[in-house]
Image (tube, rainbow, N blue to C red):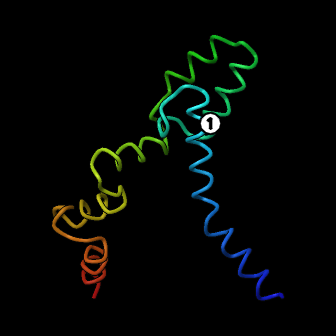
Amino acid sequence: MLKSATLAVLALTISAPAFAGQGADQMARILGVEPGAYTLSQLMDLDRAYKEDNAQAVSFILSQGNGGVSSRAAVVSETGVNPGKAQLAKILGVDVNAYTLSELVALDAARFE
């Protein structure tokens, strides 16, 4: 029984980030903005501003789109490249599309051998 409960908790822990992303996308659609353009915090602020009928806050929040974490998601969807992979390739001075992430990690490790 304890083993089953432990596995269930582990499964929920692993899948929690996926559910959070889906929740943010759903909230964005409800608020009428593009999913991925705003952070969850911005979406919550936007929801509150709409409920309080605060036009100034709504305008400010909408002007802040594609900032912070959400801009990274936009980069991945437009280029198809993980930002971490792109950064590692840049550090190594190689073309990001010429290597897999595993190969880049191996190249990076080889620099210090």
| In the image: residue 43, left or right of residue 63 | right
**In the image, residue 96 above or below residue 64:** below
**Amino acid type, callout 1:** Met
Tell me the element at label 1: helix
| In the image: residue 37, left or right of residue 50 | left
Q: Quadrant of residue 44?
A: top right
State the residue position of label 1: 27
**In the image, residue 73 above or below residue 95:** above
In percent of width and height, residue 29 lies at 56, 32
In percent of width and height, residue 21 lies at 57, 50
In percent of width and height, residue 19 lies at 62, 55
Q: In which quarter of the image is the N terminus?
A: bottom right
Camera-side residue of 70 and 7:
7
| In the image: residue 84, left or right of residue 98 | right
**In the image, residue 104 above or below residue 33:** below
Say which residue appears at 42% left-offset and 41% top-offset. Answer: 71
